[in-house]
Image (tube, helix red, strand yellow):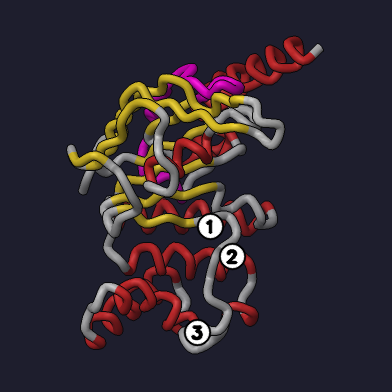
Amino acid sequence: MAGIEIRALSHQYRDTRGQRVVAVDDVSLDIKDGHFMTVVGPSGCGKTTLLNIVAGFIPASNGTVKVDGVPVTEPGPDRGVVFQSFALFDWLTVRQNIEFGPRMGDVNPRERAARADKYLAMIGLRKFADRYPYELSGGMKQRVAIARALANDPEILLMDEPFAALDAQTRELMQEELLDIWEATKKTILFITHSIEEAVYLSSDVAVMTHRPGRLKRLFDVQLPYPRKGYNIRSAPEFLQLKNAVHELVREEIARHAAEEA
């Protein structure tokens, strides 16, 4: 597995009026090998921008990102990305979607099939291998998106609010399934969410961002034991205490922004 090293990272752009906007400012952060880090903060704090820089989709204005000591300059197979919008190919079956990345990487057909079988079993969709995305529920589509990212065997999973479009019950089930996958694969995960409860439930580390410009406000080491499924962790005193602490920091930033706007 690989860790992520972010040093003095900043990103600026020009808005539609030509004004300079600082989205991320001087962020330094280490995500250790095999850790599950979630980033939370107010809307517009640069969470997705940070993930896109780590993914190699956009360049940093200043600072560096390194994966396993190697600078990130472009997208690469060492980083799999899961989006909120599923981003599946509608004209391909579930199996074909999962095999797409390995096929583009010239992986031989037998190995592609073996990888697809492995991850179909892991996400519980073997019976749906020959279905098309339009035949699946939202939760099933997101499982396929996760399996497709894993089929390339990336060292890191980058997940941008992957469960935001799901209903509450499906979202909780997907959180549990993601933890099962993470514990089975030991991938390093960088996860973006607006849900503080989701962040605390999933993560080994939670990073709280300030309102724009997005800076690192505080980093929490989540001491709740894994596995977290099988007992009512969400009502445990230590869970609620941490959730409230994170919530208070995010609320401070929202209030600060509202006061500045006023």
**Residue 105: quadrant of the picture:** bottom left
Mark 1 lies on a secondary structure that is helix
Residue type highlighted by circle 1:
Met
Q: Are marks 3 and 2 in contact (CB under 8 Å)?
A: no
Whether the residues at callouts 1 and 2 have beta carbons within 8 Å, the answer is: yes
Residue 241 location (% of width, % of height): 54, 21
Mark 1 touches mark 3? (CB < 8 Å):
no
Q: Is residue 34 above or below residue 45?
A: below
Q: Residues within 10 Å of mark 3 (few under 14, many from 20)?
A: some
Query: Which residue in the protein does label 2 denote?
Result: 139
Q: Is residue 60 left or right of residue 156?
A: right
- Viewer-nearest residue: 71 or 178: 71
**Whether residue 105 is situated above or below residue 74 in the rendered picture:** below
Q: Residue at x 63, y 82 (%)?
A: 135
Q: Which mark is residue 132?
A: none
Q: Nearer the viewer, mark 1 or mark 3?
A: 3
Cα–Cα span, label 1 and label 3: 21 Å
Task: Give the residue pinned by disc 1.
Answer: 174
Mark 2 secondary-structure assignment? helix
Percent position (x, y) of residue 11? 47, 30
Q: Indicate the position of residue 7 as horizontal and vertical percent values.
A: 31, 25
The magenta region covers 208-229
For the point 40% across and 34% down, the residue is 60
Report the residue at 38% width, 69% height from top.
122
Q: Real-space Cα distance between discs 1 and 2?
A: 7 Å
Q: In 3D space, how far apart are the residues under numbered discs 3 and 2 (Cα atoms)?
A: 16 Å
Name the residue tied to disc 3: 93
Q: Position of residue 121 (x, y in %)?
A: 38, 75
State the SS at label 3. Answer: loop
Q: Nearer the viewer, residue 66 or 139?
A: 66
Q: Indicate the amino acid at tag 3.
A: Thr
Q: Amino acid at mark 2?
A: Gly
